[in-house]
Image (spheres, grey):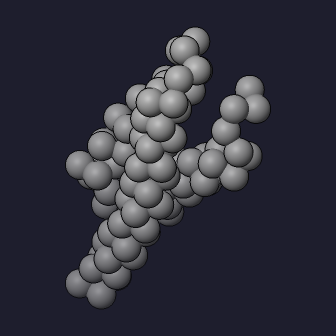
Amino acid sequence: LGILPWWVTVVIMGREIGVTLLRFWVLRFGVIPASRGGKLKTLVQTFAIGLFVLPLPEVPVVDLVRWALMALALVLTVVTGVDYVVRAFRLRHAALHG
């Protein structure tokens, strides 16, 4: 829609695709369950995206809230993505080295 900078979409989609591929990579060693942080990330992303696509009035407070939520969603996206990488490597290491 041209509402968000392109890199926001790249970060979010990259994390989602990356975590999915990571889960497949370690599937033979065990399952990485969804974390609370990941669930919070999904909730915040949903609200943030909703605020961007809903036909809300163009007032400063709405703009501030939508960008603040998107910033929080991006932080949670990156932090939980790193957490999944760490958890995957730990799971794989534990399975291989007992």
In the image, is residue 47 above or below residue 8? Answer: above
Left or right: residue 92 compared with residue 37: right
Q: Quadrant of residue 47?
A: top left
Look at the image and tell me in which quarter the C terminus lies: bottom left
Could you say where residue 24 lies in the image, as x and y percent from the top left? 49, 55
Q: Nearer the viewer, residue 52 or 17?
A: 52
Q: Residue at x 43, y 68 (%)?
A: 82
Q: Is residue 83 above or below residue 62?
A: below
Q: Position of residue 95 (x, y in %)?
A: 30, 76
Horizontal relation, residue 90 to residue 48: left or right: left
| Residue drawn at 47 percent across, 60 percent down | 78
Location of residue 31 by image quarter: bottom left
x 32%, y 77%: residue: 90
Point out residue 72 in the picture as x, y percentages from the top left corner: 41, 49
Can you give x and y, in whole percent of width and height, for residue 54 in the image? 54, 15
Residue drawn at x 42%, y 40% as measured from the top left? 69
Indicate left or right for 86 with 5 as reference: left
Towards the viewer: 93 or 54: 54
Furthest residue in direction front, as rendered: 60
In which quadrant is the N terminus drawn? top right
Name the foreground residue: 29 vs 34: 34
Say if residue 97 shows up in the picture.
yes
Res 26 seen here: no
Q: How many marks?
A: 0
5 vs 92: above or below: above
